Image (cartoon, grey):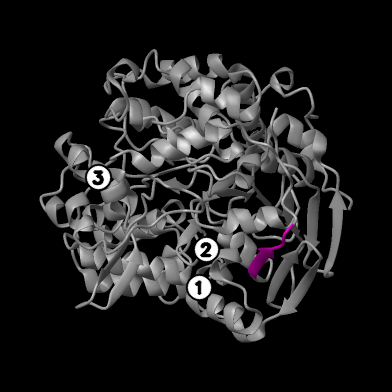
Amino acid sequence: MLHSQGPLLTLDVEDRSTAETDIEDEQRRYIGGRGLGTRLAHERVPFDADPLGADNRLYFTTGPLQVSNMSFTGRMSCTGVSPLTDGLLSSNAGGFMSRHFAGTGYGAVEVAGASDDLLAVHVRDDGVTFEEVPDLAGATVPETTAYLEEEHDISPDQTAVVGPAGENEVRFASIMTTEDRAFGRGGLGAALGAKGVKALTFGGDSAPEIEVSATQQDIHREAATDDHIMKRQGTVSVMDLANEMNGLPTRYFADQQFEGVEGINGAAVESKKYKKGTCSACAFACKLPTRDEEAGVETEGPEFEVAMAFGSNSGVDDIVEVMKSNEQCDNYGLDSISAGNTVAAYLASEDEFGNDELVHDLVEKIARREGVGDLLAEGIDRAHEELGVENWSVKGMDFAAHEGRVLNGQGLSYAVSNRGADHMYATFYSVEYPLVPADQALDPEGTLGKAERLAHRENLMALNDSGVVCKFSRDYMSPERYADLFEADFEDLLDVGRRTVTLERHFNNQRGFDRAEDQGLPYDLPDFEQALDEYYDQRGWEDGVVPDAALPDDVSASSGSQAAGD
């Protein structure tokens, strides 16, 4: 099986030390990316770790395809205990950093401990430098990358940076790379900020020599030549369809259609797009560099989720105002979905929907934890009672744009996902709109009979995140192509995904997660409890808990109960 190569590099930021560990066995079984990060975290992070404490660890990992020139491979993964969900979580970012990371020669980088001084840590194939950067305290993401470029000739493409939100431990702070790409959902930026790390940088010429099948060339050619709407409008191209289906969250989820949709839809975004945008080596080019000269705003996006959160869910119908919010989140280092939804919760509490000036003010207050921003920085799950609004979250994570009250299988996916109400965990929405061929589509109504397909898609998405392959490659990948690229039977590859999902769930079980957390939807779904049972049967779990017999055979049930003694 094709897998990432190179040792684990541990960065102990407390005593400024490094260590290397052979992880070839783990790489062979989990490929790389999310699978490898999850396996390492399960072994090396205490089950009772404080997400914002020194005993939490973060794992940056990439996969074997990051040494190829194939489209859809400009991505990597970060794994740790989430300050937002309190469970083990992997976040995935695109951009250009993955190949610089591969150039270091390391298969994974672990950040351990916590520093009393603000640090930039520079990882190269010829050594590691711990740099104290007190003058960067409170700096925005662009200010930080400008310093790194001016003082060290390090490009933004080589960096993983936290903004003020990460330093201030906002529970949905992002780790930003290439300035405007994010390890977004789950707040791992707060975990890195709590460690006193302002920036990590990567570089070198020691990428492993991994031979990748010529299938990569076919995929790359098809990605380059296909006339796909996402190349023009990105994910926001689905907004009109969602609205027509009565499935566009509006005014903090109170409504499901937005009368101002034409002001924030795919056509509105496309009208502000001024050039093509992409990730490393990718010819699909689905990114959205946008600007409005009159307003003086230039950003990347917004994508569908952000146009929902800062647009329809906040009652804002002007794409330029949504672009401003998007730019703020990138600059401050905030997950733009959670930031927008949390702002929408405050707007609901104050009956201020559509007040774009208030929206922008709130984003800054959240990032700096000033005034009401200190409460909102805790996220909807922790703030909703004081705000007097309904708790639109699952396992602490607020909802993505794909409406589970209409796409019932997606609603079930939100419920059982180890990450909470995150759309990318299974991307089940794609088979219910549908965005796939008719023979692969499902009726969006109902939950029964969907568990097998849901578990399959969770496993497949975990495989993608381990490879690492962008999830928007769905029209270009097939079981045969997976098997050829990764030199393994497709079912064996899916088993990598299954083991990854199982380890995430087992880790979270040790932190108290069980069926009760899967029952956290704020709305009713038809036959929901029976559908939960069907899902657990597919997984071999008992009321949401992984029995010891269902653990992968390379894992001890107690492995995460002690920190690694390295």
Magenta region's main secondary structure? strand
Name the residue tied to disc 3: 237
Residue 88 lies in quadrant: top right
Residue under the image location 46 percent in, 48 percent down: 282
Residue under the image location 15 percent in, 51 percent down: 261
> Do labels 2 and 1 touch, CB within 8 Å?
yes
Residue under the image location 28 percent in, 23 percent down: 444
From the viewer's perspective, is residue 67 above or below residue 386?
A: above
Residue placed furthest toward the right? 565
> Horizontally, is 362 left or right of 120 in the view?
left
> Horizontally, is 509 left or right of 313 in the view?
right
Specify which label sits upstream in the sequence, 2 or 3: 2
Q: CA distance from mark 1 to mark 3?
A: 28 Å
Name the residue tied to disc 1: 141
From the viewer's perspective, is residue 39 above or below residue 83?
A: above
Residue 24 lies in quadrant: top right
Give the number of the mark in front: 1 or 3: 3
From the viewer's perspective, is residue 112 above or below residue 86?
A: below
Name the residue tied to disc 2: 176
> Do labels 1 and 3 touch, CB within 8 Å?
no
Specify which label sits upstream in the sequence, 2 or 1: 1
* Residue 520 seen from this side: no
On the image, the x and y values in percent for residue 28 come to: 75, 32
On the image, the x and y values in percent for residue 264 come to: 19, 55
Residue placed furthest toward the bottom? 135
Magenta stretch containing residue 429, yes or no?
A: no
Helix, strand, or loop for circle 2?
A: strand
Q: Which residues are magenta?
A: 199-205
Q: What's the amino acid at mark 2?
A: Met
